Image: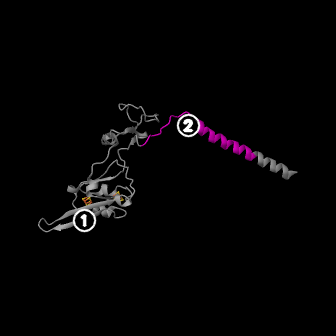
Amino acid sequence: MLKFLKQVGDYAKEAVQAGKYIGQGLAVTFDHMRRRPITVQYPYEKLIPSERFRGRIHFEFDKCISCEVCVRVCPINLPVVDWEFNKETKKKQLRHYSIDFGVCIFCGNCVEYCPTNCLSMTEEYELSTYDRHELNFDNVALGRLPYKVTDDPMVTPLRELAYLPKGVMDPHDVPDSYRRAGQLPEEILEKSEK
Ligand code: SF4
Ligand code: SF4
C-alpha cells in the first residue's frame, strides 16, 4: 500500500514539474509575440557592421617595409612577404604580399603590430567562393578598396542593434537622424581624455 502511495506521490510531483516547464516555455513564446520582427531580407537588405568589425584585410603595398612583423605576430605565420634585397638602396624591396583568408582567423594581430600601418581591417565580410584557392588574396586583391554596404545602391543598409536607439529592436524605418544607443569610438576617447 505504502509503495503504491509513494508511486502516486512521485507521479504527482513529476506532473507538477512538467507543468512548470511548459509554463516557462510558453512564457518565452508569449513574450516574443509582443516583439517586432528583426529579420533582415538579405541580400536586398544588409546590416552595417560595427566600427570595430574585423573583416577582410586591406593592404597598402607602397607603405610596406617588408619587416615581416605581421608574419611573426600571426598565430599561424600566415602572411607571405616576398622581398629581395636591393643592393643599391641597401633596403628590402617588396615583390609580392599575400594572405590566405581561407586560413586566416581574423584575429587582427598583424594589423595591430604593423609598424607602418599598411594593414587595416575592413567591414567586408562576404568572402565566400566555390574554390577555396580563390581566398588566397595577393597584394592586388588586398589593395582593392573595401565594399561598403552604405555605398551599394542595390542594397538597403540597416543599422545593427548596437546602432539603434535604446529599446528599439527593429532597424527598419529608423531615421538616420536618430541618435544611436552606443557611443562612437571618438566620443569614448574624448571622455577618457578629460
Ligand atoms: S608588418 Fe607591415 S610593414 Fe612589416 S611586412 Fe607586414 S605589412 Fe609590411
Ligand atoms: S588577422 Fe590574424 S590570422 Fe589573419 S593574417 Fe593577421 S595575424 Fe594572421
* Label 1 crowd bin: few (<14), some (14–19), many (20+), radius 10 Å: some
Residue stretch in magenta: 13-42
Quadrant housing residue 49: top left
Q: Residue at x 62, y 42 (%)?
A: 25
Q: Secondary structure at mark 1?
A: strand
How far apart are labels 2 and 1 at the CA level? 55 Å
Q: Would residue 156 be visible to someone looking at this image?
A: yes
Q: Which residue is mark 2?
A: 32
Q: Position of residue 64 (x, y in %)?
A: 22, 58
Q: Residue at x 84, y 53 (%)?
A: 3
Q: Would residue 117 be visible to someone looking at this image?
A: no
Q: Residue at x 25, y 65 (%)?
A: 82
Q: Residue furthest front?
A: 130
Q: Which residue is mark 1?
A: 82
Q: Where residue 162 is drawn, which disc sits there? A: none
Q: Earlier in the sequence, mark 2 or mark 1?
A: 2
